[in-house]
Image: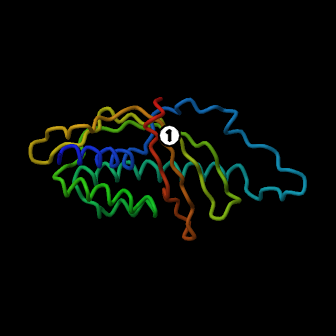
Amino acid sequence: MRGRQLGRRATSLLTVAAVGAATACGADPATTARTAPAAGTPTPTHSAADERAARQAALAAYAGYLAASRTASGRSDPHHPDLARFLADPLLTRVRLSIHEAKEHGAMRTGTLVSDPTVTSVSLDSSPPTVEIQDCLDATGYRLVYARSKRVVPGTGGTRHLATATATRYPDGRWLISAGAAHEDLPC
């Protein structure tokens, strides 16, 4: 029973910690194209360089989030300092809770998580500014194992699936990953 319970929670941890990237997972270029503003709509005040900088900052935050999540999960440390460096709530709390639950059951993460994210939209005129990221996350080599025996927790096998994340620019200028979801029902 304990293994099944941990297996369900581990899937949740994989879902949270694996909001990573691999290949664009079939991102349709038509869905990422910007449309002209409607008549009477104010024209955006940001330049192409601003948008490029936002994309780069958001992708850097996303890569930092994945690395921090892997490190914190591998050490069973829900308060690893790098988590707060790249994540914001509500995602920060979800990741910490998932790592804490795995630790409570004597489990930790090992292996590799393959990611190659793609920006799907940039909204610099929204308040706060956001960047949406899509990813085909390969978690087949990322395992939840029992810390003592290193045996794989039953029911926690990884998959290749679509993942999405939102990077938000905070008043201090930092881009942090504030939301994310793994869509395990959408293989890629």
Residue type, numbered disc 1: Pro
Task: Identify the residue at image location x=21%, y=38%.
Answer: 154
Q: Residue 117 appears at what percent x and percent y?
A: 50, 40
Which residue occupies the foreground of this view, 86 or 97? 97
The residue wearing badge 1 is 117
The N terminus, quarter of image? top left
Task: Identify the residue at image location x=83%, y=50%.
Answer: 37
User: How is the protein colored in the picture?
Assistant: rainbow
Q: Residue 20 appears at what percent x and percent y?
A: 43, 43
Q: Is residue 91 left or right of residue 152?
A: right
Q: Is residue 144 left or right of residue 67?
A: left
Q: Residue 66 appears at what percent x and percent y?
A: 39, 48
Task: Identify the residue at image location x=67%, y=54%.
Answer: 123
Task: Identify the residue at image location x=19%, y=49%.
Answer: 107
Looking at the image, the residue that sits furthest to the front is 1
Looking at the image, the residue that sits furthest to the left is 149
Which residue occupies the foreground of this view, 33 or 17? 17
